[in-house]
Image (cartoon, helix red, strand yellow):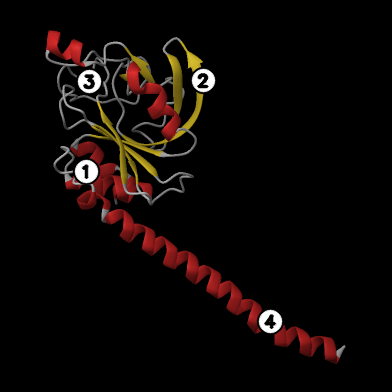
Amino acid sequence: MKKALLILLAILPLSLASVGTTVSAKAHTAVDKASLWAGVYDGLNLERMGLQKEVFDYALRGIQKTKFTKSILSIVDLSQPSNKKRLYVIDLDQQKLLFQTYVAHGRNSGELMAASFSNTFSSFQSSLGFYQTLNTYQGKHGLSLQLKGLEQGFNDNAFSRAIVMHGADYVCEDFIRKTGRLGRSQGCPAIANAVSKDIINAIKGGSCLFVYSPSPDYLQKSTFLL
């Protein structure tokens, strides 16, 4: 009995040291990853692409608040007009800009600029905040991507409202030439049919989508930005 106890006491410090090393390694990895991601903005010259540093920093702050299964970050920058390529899909670990393209906002959010936002049913407005991408399905717009809103009061009704990413024929340069802006959705971040499958397949299954606008209400109340 005494011999067994001595063996246990001898092993215990080694076990605790192993646990401590594992925790330390995980913390170190998280710090390294955050440092790596912070350099992506300058490395990809995203300022030249039209994305403000402040918006990128908000997106990084939010993605680190929740465990996403992919290091792909999608930013819908609604501070830009719809005739600009304001959707950025970034592979943070690989430091690659996968896509920069057009994305529509909700019809009741505004015309050229999105200025009004809602989390309520039948509002036909875009919802701000952080989302987790879920599964794909075949709907009336073809391949579509389900989204889970993560921010209570801002976008947590997105799944029930059927706010999804899908392709749309009104998201194209021909529409912009005719009207000066993109067509508008019922609140979905709709993208061009020509790239919809590639984008949806790249970001599906647990990546982060951030829909941004400099709304004072959102910036002051979002727990993801604290």
For marks 2 and 4 on the same chain, the one whose residue lies earlier in the sequence: 4
What residue sits right under mark 2 in the picture?
Answer: 137
Between circles 3 and 1, the one closer to the viewer is 1
State the separation of the CA atoms marked 1 and 4. Answer: 48 Å
**Label 4 secondary element:** helix
For marks 3 and 2 on the same chain, the one whose residue lies earlier in the sequence: 3
Between circles 3 and 2, the one closer to the viewer is 2
What residue sits right under mark 1 in the picture?
Answer: 55
88 lies above or below 24: above
Location of the N terminus by quadrant is: bottom right
What residue sits right under mark 4 in the picture?
Answer: 12
* Residue type beneath disc 4: Leu
For marks 1 and 4 on the same chain, the one whose residue lies earlier in the sequence: 4
Between circles 2 and 4, the one closer to the viewer is 2
State the separation of the CA atoms marked 4 and 3. Answer: 61 Å
* Residue type beneath disc 1: Val
| Front one among 13 and 156 | 13
For marks 4 and 3 on the same chain, the one whose residue lies earlier in the sequence: 4
| Front one among 120 and 18 | 18
For marks 3 and 1 on the same chain, the one whose residue lies earlier in the sequence: 1
**Label 1 secondary element:** helix
